[in-house]
Image (cartoon, rainbow, N blue to C red):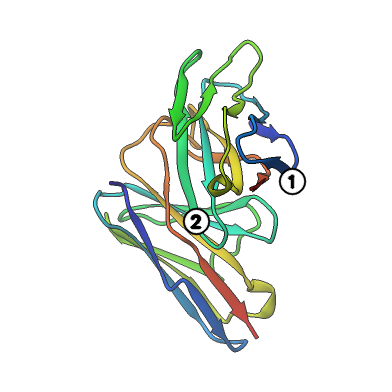
Amino acid sequence: GAVVSQHPSRVICKSGTSVKIECRSLDFQATTMFWYRQFPKQSLMLMATSNEGSKATYEQGVEKDKFLINHASLTLSTLTVTSAHPEDSSFYICSARTGTGSSQPQHFGDGTRLSIL
Amino acid sequence: GDSVTQMEGPVTLSEEAFLTINCTYTATGYPSLFWYVQYPGEGLQLLLKATKADDKGSNKGFEATYRKETTSFHLEKGSVQVSDSAVYFCALSEGYGGSQGNLIFGKGTKLSVKP
């Protein structure tokens, strides 16, 4: 149980392109979804937290106009990297959590490797 | 603020060796503690968790005990296998306030197990 599907797994595109990444909870309803960025050999950096039906909460230093997050339903959140540039190349990982409270674990997708040429 | 410190890797062991990956935390509240594992090219998988002091989380032969007195949550396994090679992340989930439920990760420890 608690499967999170993230798509696509890999994207290679030209500079200036906008890229959309989907995150779906397949067998549970996710009240909260999280988006992380991971640089090579480093830990995960939380970018934003989104609750279904409300605006995402962005971490300090993350441009909300650059990284658009939509959490339209209890099973789907999308991250759109707008006008991507080479410095946006990274591994993006989403996670989803059902319920509230610190004891509820987050369940992670397999990540999206984004490469901007 | 809350933080997680885990031993730096990489850690290289022979198959069937004993594994310990140290993890300590600082928190102002009563966090829940987690170990996640990341295999190459994949996202993170929850390995085990503990939600209160003295709880022991266990899964797939791995164990970790929530020690409030030493603010630690060390990961152990009695006999590692080649298939355990991965990066292991210790994390805490803040227990109160606006950031409740957000995960704070350690930097990760890469484990390589040689046959």
The vertical placement of B55 against A89, above or below, is above
Label 2 crowd (10 A; few <14 / some 14-19 / many >=20): many
| SS for dot 2 | loop
Q: Chain of mark 1?
A: B
Would you identify the image quadrant in which residue A53 lies? Answer: bottom left
Residue B47 location (% of width, % of height): 47, 38
The vertical placement of B95 against A26, above or below, is above
**Label at residue B43:** 2
Same chain? Circles 1 and 2: yes
Residue type for callout 1: Pro
Residue type for callout 2: Gly
Residue A42 location (% of width, % of height): 69, 53
Q: Chain of mark 2?
A: B
Q: Nearer the viewer, residue B47 or B66?
A: B47
On screen, residue A50 versus residue A11, left or right, reads left
Q: Nearer the viewer, residue B49 or B16?
A: B16
| SS for dot 1 | loop
Q: Residue at x 62, y 81 (%)?
A: A116
